[in-house]
Amino acid sequence: MRNKYYTDFKISQYEDIDENSIQLINSTKARYIEPTEITYLGNPLIEALPPTLDMESIFLRVEKIPPYIDEERNKTEIERLEAIYRLNDYRFPFTKYYEVGLKISIALKRGYINKRIFSPDYTDSLKELNLILNNSANEIKEFKEGFLNMTLASSAPLGFSIIGVSGAGKSTTVNDILSFYPQVIHHTEYEEQKYYFAQVTWIKVDCTYDGNIKGLCQKIFYEFDKVLKTNYLQKYGNSRFSIDRMIIAISYLCMKHGLGMLIIDEIQHLKCSKRQDEAALNFFVSMMNEIKLPIVYIGTYKAIKHLSKDGRHIRRSMGIGMTEFRYLKDDAEFEMFLGELWEYQWVKNKTELTDEIKKLFHERTAGIVDLSVKLFMTVQFEAIRRGVEKITSKLIKEVANEKFALSKELTDAIIKYDINKLMKYEDLIAPADMEELFENCRHEVMSRSQAMEILKGEERKNSRNKKELINELRLFLSELGYNYNDFLNIVDELISIEGIRKPVSYLKQRLIKQIVLSKPQEVNGKKETKRINKKNITIDLTEDIKTIELP
């Protein structure tokens, strides 16, 4: 009798593990749910996956709003600067989230549909890949050539591409959707059959700038090691392994661990300038397609050059179409996004979102979400730093010009959707790093705050009062005909003992007594004795000093 399906959930069978929020579940025991699609029945790799979510469920999970109360605008400058930084994790659920979420769910399940881990075919495929992996270099070369000729007209791929301008939210959207899926699912029993299988649902790698196929392969080994605690990078990614052998090793590991999807981000950085690089990429894509592994390519418009050099890569990345992240038009969706973002103001004087400001924001960010959020944050940083404590059109223009300067050519290319021009740009001209902006503003505000505290502080008041007292005692001794410098030690000792809070008249009285009782002062290297004229004392001192008994 089959194990009962897991039914006690609202959105996902793993929701009590991730608390129904966006956070990566690294590893969990399998919980099977009954699929509605009949071709998925009886496949534990599919039944262990969360269900395909509807738009409302996706929106509820991805939306991430920062904590905010209006009274926070009365906090200190430093506290408000730190509060503004909460917006760095702000998520607004755009319709693209649903499109990407649906495609990832479909691609995962379609990739697993023929991977039934208890079937002889699955076991035979693993054995065959293992044998090829251990072949000689010449045998590997022969296999590659024969394989590529055989698979030119292979079945349709299962992945897709996500292309768009930098900062449009491509990677963020994919990362948030991937967080719905446990990255490693441990299977221990299915239909009363005990077994163990570690299913890796997805792996995501980033292409470093000027990266190559070898580096990409090594990153894939590293990601397997990270989630499974293995040592595949050391075993298969070392210098003794050719790129072709690495590709075969990856194919073997993808089958061995039931990899559901490979996501390659920043694909525009992949270097395929040489003929052998192009051949390696062909072999890599063909092998992944052969083992029915969905690949999701993420990149800027420049990536189209890599994916469509000979027409084959782009076809193989278009299994269920290309998702394009364009700018947000100046329409209802952008207005709703900016309207909700605008509520999070930590400046002292709140500004209403006018049509002029909406238009200005759209013009200066080209409707790019990431730039819009960062511009909003930076304008508030500057409003607090400068002490204006209000968002104005003038301030928005100044901040945009200084830190978010997009060339008119690039802005026009985005808005007019000029693909040829967009393909010229590696990335948008990125704004200054938010960490750096925040730290600079915080440092300046903190320095200003510290200065104000020092100016208002008790220590400064005491220091100021001491200086005023010393100046008064200096003048007093000068009027008596004495050089103040001759009695510095006496004055310091007096203030140290008596403090600065006592009446000046009393301190003058004590000073005179100390001078009279002191030994002859040494002036200019000679001992000299001066006596105080009683007449001067009685004239210049207060009534209290008249009581002093002079020797």
Image (cartoon, rainbow, N blue to C red):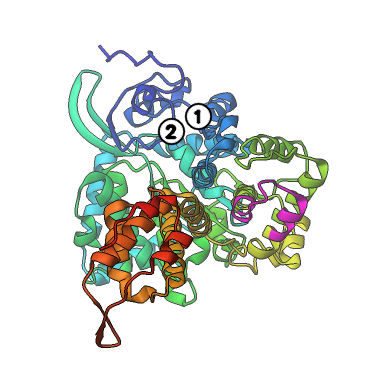
Residue 527: x percent and y percent?
24, 83
Q: Is residue 280 left or right of residue 340?
A: left
**How many numbered badges does the structure rendering display?**
2
92 relative to 525, above or below? above
Q: CA distance from mark 2 to mark 1?
A: 9 Å
Name the quarter where the N terminus is drawn: top left
Cβ atoms under marks 2 and 1 closer than 8 Å: yes
Residue linked to disc 1: 61
Q: Which portion, as a residue range, is magenta?
A: 382-398
Residue 264: x percent and y percent?
45, 54
Q: Nearer the viewer, residue 461 or 159?
A: 461
Residue, far right: 356
Which class describes the residues within 10 Å of circle 2: few (<14), some (14-19), or many (20+)?
many
**What SS does tag 2 mark?**
loop
Amino acid type, label 1? Arg
Name the quarter where the C terminus is drawn: bottom left
Which class describes the residues within 10 Å of circle 1: few (<14), some (14-19), or many (20+)?
some
* Residue 287 visible to an observer of this rendering: yes
Decide which of tag 2 and tag 1 comes sooner along the chain.
1
Residue linked to disc 2: 180
The residue located at (25%, 51%) in the rendering is 225
Q: Main secondary structure of the magenta part?
A: helix
246 relative to 109, above or below? below
The residue located at (77%, 51%) in the rendering is 393
Residue 383 magenta = yes
Residue 133: x percent and y percent?
24, 59
Amino acid type, label 2? Phe
**What SS does tag 1 mark?**
helix
Residue 404 magenta = no
Between circles 2 and 1, the one closer to the viewer is 1
Residue 446: x percent and y percent?
48, 54
